[in-house]
Image (tube, rainbow, N blue to C red):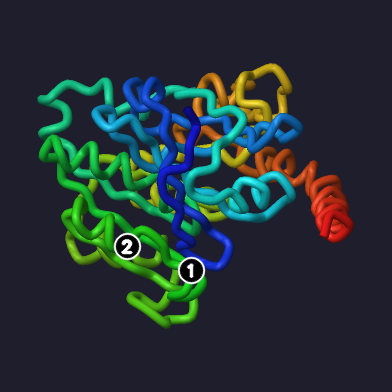
Amino acid sequence: MFEILSKEMLTPSICRMKVNVPRIAASARPGQFLIVRADEKGERIPLTISDFDATQGWVTIVTQAIGASSSDIVSFEVGERFADVAGPLGLPSDFVKASDEVLAGSSYVFIAGGVGTAPVYPQVKWLHDRGVKVDVIVGARTRELLIYTDELSKVADNLYICTDDGSEGFHGVGTAMLEKLVSEGKRYTQAVAIGPMIMMKFATLCCCKLGIPIIVSLNTLMVDGTGMCGACRVTVGGKTRFACVEGPEFDGALVDFDEAMRRQGQYRSEEAFEKERHKCRIGRDK
């Protein structure tokens, strides 16, 4: 169990791994996440499921090496095993429960940014397999940071690539691309944004202006993943919600993004200290 079946560096800091977890794969649905613990002393890291196969018994996780614990996960190689992988956790995407009639009349647009592009893939794939019209807008600062474009091009009706520096695709951000598409006659019944918190905030503002309902994924707020630590508290529609057990997906128009971004930043100084301590420990071990 928990054996790494394959590993690929999508960018210098973003790693894709296929992990053997038959029971989790059998129950997984788009929108859900896992908790991964690299070793017995490791921190619990929430990672959104980026693909799964119930028959073969594997799930795919995509990890960006930012802090000490995520760097530990990325350091594992094929054939090694994680200490724990728990899941699937969180609620599946709302469309999983939708009737065939509702899905048949739907037209989705996904706005993906950075490592958030990875969990977009299983959602688009699920909708594509049921004949739902889906467009995807993928954004990154530069072409070297784009991920999952080949995979998404096979399951999306249309894939629109955006880069801040214009090195590939549309020169600009994803919201500008969305406004351009709508101005050209595109019509969507639902938008989904997954990526950095600030990106999801502006995607929500854009969709509200355009009259498109939008769902956002607040997985970046999670720490413990079970609702016990309270780190993922967020105000949605004036009420306190827990992203890990009541989400991670919520109606973007109801999310207090400013509060969420303040909460997201509260552990940055501690994480920076731990990462430096981790580097020192590795140096001593050598």
Q: Is residue 208 visible?
A: no
Residue type, label 2: Thr
Is residue 12 placed above or below 46 in the rendered structure? below
How far is mark 2 from mark 1, CA to CA?
A: 11 Å
Specify whether 38 is left or right of 86. right
Q: Residue 24, how many percent across, how many down? A: 41, 24
Can residue 96 be seen in the rendering of this structure? yes
Q: Secondary structure at mark 2?
A: helix
Residue 149 disc label: 2
> Seen in the image, is 126 located left or right of residue 71?
left
Residue labelled with disc 1: 145
> How many dots with numbers?
2
**Residue at the location (64% across, 21% down)?**
240
Q: Position of residue 31 (x, y in %)?
A: 40, 33
Residue 107: percent from left, percent from top: 19, 43
Residue drawn at the location 16% of the way across and 31% of the way down: 103
